[in-house]
C-alpha cells in the first residue's frame, strides 16, 4: 500500500499555515499551540523543538507523549471526510489536528474544542 505524502512532510512546513489560517480569522497562535499540545501531550518546549527539528508528521506523532484519551470525541467533516471514519491511525491523528485548528479558526469556545 502506498503511503500518503503528508506522512513524510515536515510538521514545521505545515505549522505556519495553521497559524496563518487562525490569525486571518482573528485568533492567536497560542490557541493553535494549546490544541496541538492537548491532542499530543507535548509541552510547549517539546512542540517548539519538534518544529525547529523539522520532524515529519509521522515522527511528530510517533514521538508524541500521549494522544489525548478524549481525541476520539473529535467528530465531523474535514476535507469532506468524517474524521471518526478514517481507517489509517496516522492520517486520523493528522485530521484530528486539522479539525481542532478549524474549530479554533471558527472561534469555537476552547472548552468545547478541548472536549472538556
Image (spheres, rainbow, N blue to C red):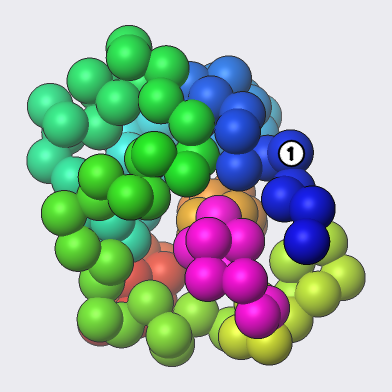
Q: Position of residue 35 (x, y in %)?
A: 35, 53
Label 1: how many Cα within 10 Å (few below 14, some 14–19, many 20+): few
Is residue 87 located in the magenta-colored stretch of the structure? yes
Q: Is residue 9 left or right of residue 1?
A: left
Q: Is residue 88 left or right of residue 34?
A: right
Q: Residue furthest top?
A: 52
Residue located at (31% from left, 82% from top): 70
Q: Which residue is mark 1?
A: 5
Residue 107 in view: no
Residue located at (25% from left, 50% from top): 64
Residue 49 in view: yes
Q: Which residues are magenta?
A: 86-94
Q: Residue furthest right?
A: 80
Q: Position of residue 102 (x, y in %)?
A: 62, 55
Residue located at (25% from left, 32% from top): 47
Q: Nearer the viewer, residue 106 or 83?
A: 83
Q: Nearer the viewer, residue 26 or 31?
A: 31
The image quarter in which residue 63 lies: top left
Label 1 SS: helix
Q: Position of residue 44 (x, y in %)?
A: 16, 33
Residue located at (28% from left, 56% from top): 40
Q: Nearer the viewer, residue 20 or 26?
A: 20
* Quarter of the figure with the N terminus: bottom right
Relative height, residue 104 to residue 14 (above, below):
below
Is residue 48 located in the magenta-colored stretch of the structure? no
The image quarter in which residue 68 lies: bottom left
Relative height, residue 7 to residue 81 (above, below):
above
Q: Is residue 103 left or right of residue 37?
A: right
* Quarter of the figure with the C terminus: bottom left
Q: Position of residue 94 (x, y in %)?
A: 55, 55
Amino acid at each position: 500500500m502506498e503511503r500518503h505524502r503528508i506522512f513524510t512532510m515536515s510538521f514545521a512546513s505545515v505549522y505556519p499555515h495553521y497559524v496563518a489560517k487562525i490569525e486571518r480569522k482573528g485568533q492567536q497562535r497560542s490557541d493553535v499551540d494549546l490544541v496541538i499540545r492537548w491532542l499530543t501531550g507535548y509541552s510547549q518546549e517539546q512542540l517548539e523543538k519538534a518544529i525547529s527539528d523539522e520532524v515529519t508528521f509521522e515522527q511528530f506523532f510517533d514521538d508524541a507523549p500521549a494522544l489525548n484519551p478524549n481525541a476520539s470525541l473529535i467528530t465531523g467533516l474535514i476535507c469532506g471526510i468524517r474524521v471518526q471514519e478514517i481507517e489509517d491511525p496516522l492520517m486520523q491523528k493528522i485530521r484530528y489536528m486539522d479539525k481542532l485548528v478549524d474549530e479554533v479558526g471558527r472561534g469555537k469556545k476552547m472548552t468545547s474544542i478541548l472536549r472538556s
